[in-house]
Image (tube, grey):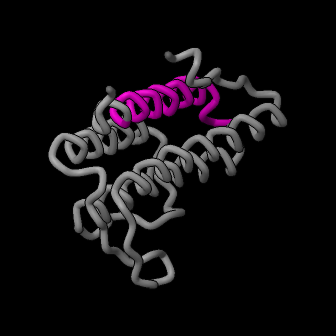
Amino acid sequence: MIQFQDFFREKFEFDLHANLRWCDLLSAHEDTLPTYVIKSMSHIINVHHIWNCRLMQQPAESSDWDLLPFAYWPHLLRDNFRKTTDYLDHQSAFEKINYHDSEGVPMEKEAMDILYHVLNHSNYHRAQIAKCCKDANLPVANTNFIVFK
């Protein structure tokens, strides 16, 4: 039977792979990227960082929609991945995480649900990036999980 850590590690490896594919593809068009693409990729990175901080009960260093310099994206993506996988190696899927949402409302969720949310969130915004790039006649990265697998 597959373990929680192995299941999520593979999914976060895919998430990193997909985000880095987008970075590679977008780097060739850095000067002509629609603002929405830059905002959305920054948002993916920021939100993953924020959830990592919530999991580890640490303050976040960025907000949801902070714009991040393009050159830092790959490093920040790898850092988020490393922190998530470190968490997976040392914590329980059923650990209750207490945090405050972006509105300041106290919340409590299981780690497994938070990790799943991070993956869903990234995938959702990558699809929006793909649509925006297609509409701007820019190339679109094939980041389907089944292709990665």
Quadrant of the image occupied by residue 94: bottom left
Give the left or right position of residue 48, taking residue 23 as reference: left
Nearest the viewer among 56 and 49 is: 56
Q: Which secondary structure class fits the magenta region best?
A: helix
- Write the start and end of the magenta stretch as one range: 8-32
Identify the residue at image location x=71%, y=44%: 128
Q: Is residue 15 magenta?
A: yes
Residue 64 position in % (x across, y down): 50, 64
Nearest the viewer among 110 and 119 is: 110
Give the left or right position of residue 59, taking residue 71 as reference: left
Q: Is residue 95 above or below residue 81?
A: below
Nearest the viewer among 48 and 9 is: 9
Q: How many marks?
A: 0
Identify the residue at image location x=45%, y=84%: 105
Q: Is residue 70 above or below residue 108?
A: above
Give the left or right position of residue 121, taking residue 93 as reference: right
Look at the image and tell me in which quarter the N terminus lies.
Answer: top left
Q: Residue furthest front?
A: 1
Q: Is residue 146 magenta?
A: no
Q: Is residue 23 above or below residue 118?
A: above
Residue 63 position in % (x across, y down): 44, 67
Give the left or right position of residue 142, taking residue 96 as reference: right
Nearest the viewer among 127 and 37 is: 127
Q: Residue furthest left?
A: 90
Quadrant of the image occupied by residue 132: top right
Identify the residue at image location x=23%, y=68%: 57
Residue 85 position in % (x across, y down): 26, 39
Identify the residue at image location x=33%, y=45%: 80
